[in-house]
Image (spheres, rainbow, N blue to C red):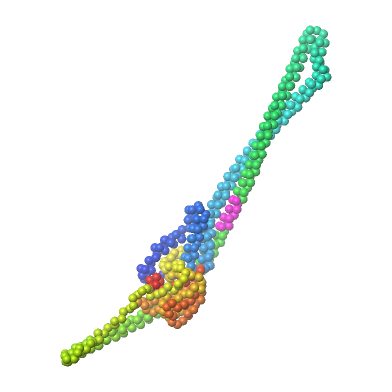
Amino acid sequence: MWRTPAPRSVSVRRYAGISVALACSLALMAPVSALQGADPDPNQQKRKVDSQIDQLREDLSETNSSLASAFTALQATQAKLPGAQAALAQAQGAAARAQTENAMAAQELDVAQANETKAQDELATTTKQIRDSRGDVAQFAAQIYQEQGFGEFDMAMTSTSPQQFADRIALIGTVMDLQGQSMVALATAKASQTAQEDHLSALRADSEKAKRKAEAALAAASAARDKATAAKTALDALAAQQSKQAAAVKAQSIAEQARINQMQVESNRLSAVIKARAAAALRAARIAAAANAKAKAEAAARARQNADAAARARRNAESRPPSGGNTGGDSTRPPANTGGPLSAPMTVGRISSEYGMRFHPIQRVWRLHSGRDYAAPCGSPVKAAASGTVIEAGYNSSYGNRVIVDHGVINGVHLTTTYNHLERVRLSSGRVQRGAVVGYEGSTGNSTGCHLHFEVYEDGTFVDPRSYL
């Protein structure tokens, strides 16, 4: 149970575990996200977060379950935030890269399509040239066919003068040259057409490849944008969840502080009751010790008187055999202490939390964890640590079902034990023997899970149970 330390001076052993608790608490105070971000392995990150959450649950074992659940949920959400932020940054980076690749692919497609269009235009021009050249050649062929190959010669032979004949022969040469050039141009154009068609086919293949690449880049960019949008949505949802959980923790924390105040009042009341019983028991023990000492002194005096009388009798009657005198005194000794005066209240489960100062991760203050916690399944038997008298038993809002046993004065100190958060109380009054079942482990009151919170009072003040076990 979390408590404000009592004002009475506390023995050194009470603070023996403070340095260890401080180290553990400082580790808890560090943001979970800082540890998570140090390791890129998601599985290791999850194991670290789960371990820290488990540690939180143990530290909050004596806290109201609603507050503990809200705080644990908040810590879990905060632990997810760095991963969500990293996922968003990664998705946004991938989206930016995909968008750049998409733009480059679109540019390559434009260039490929422009080259293809240019090649198509050049091929169309060449095709027209071939068509025109073929018309000229066809006209030449038709003329030759019609004139049976003698048209130009007849024209030359019908000349009326040598000059006219020479002119007509020159004209015929020019026409023949033009016809030859047309034939050469036709052959060249056809060869160019073949090359251009091959080039166009290659450019079309490039265009198709660029088109597929652009489509893939566009799809990748779209998918990356969708992923970035989803990551942003997830991060926003976590942020909203964190805000809501933080508000819940704040509200529950206020209520928890009120419960802590009530618990402190109850602790002070019980401490006063136990201190009064301890004072009475110690007075009775002192009176009994004084009476015992007086009885021993009287017995010793009587023994001395008897010894003196015996000596006188020996002197008066030397012939009588000496009589043995009672030397008096207490010859009994306390049995060897083979163990502590208290037995462990549980024989199953494990020790989930020791006695000592703890840093409360929600209230952000140091408090005394005033007992030892035993974690076992609910319903496990809880036994009296020593013989004694049940002085209180019942339900308390903070401690749940509990039993308080007064063991009287043992080894010069008054010992009282408490058994808290019980599922059910078995013994509610009267004498109880060491090892008798006083109740059954549970999770009532301020508790987040099945456990026994076992406390030991020494003269009305909390002490580490291990000192007496």
Between residues 36 and 89, which one lies in front from this camera angle? 36
Instruction: Examine the rendered structure and indicate whether residue 256 appears above or below residue 156.
Output: below
203 sits left or right of 349 in the view: right
**What residue is rendered at 49% in x and 58% in y?**
48
Between residues 391 and 304, which one lies in front from this camera angle? 304
Looking at the picture, how far across and down is residue 319, in whole percent? 17, 91
Looking at the picture, how far across and down is residue 146, in whole percent? 83, 19
415 sits left or right of 309 in the view: right
The C terminus lies in quadrant:
bottom left
> What predominant SS class does the magenta segment belong to?
helix
Which segment is the magenta one? 227-239
**What residue is rendered at 59% in x and 50% in y?**
228
**What residue is rendered at 45% in x and 72% in y?**
347
- Residue found at the very far top of the displayed protein: 162
Q: Residue 234 magenta-drawn?
A: yes
Looking at the picture, how far across and down is residue 341, in whole percent? 38, 75
Count of labels in the image? 0
Say which quarter of the image contains residue 298: bottom left
Looking at the picture, how far across and down is residue 170, in whole percent? 75, 12
Between residues 446 and 141, which one lies in front from this camera angle? 141
Q: Is residue 52 visible?
A: yes
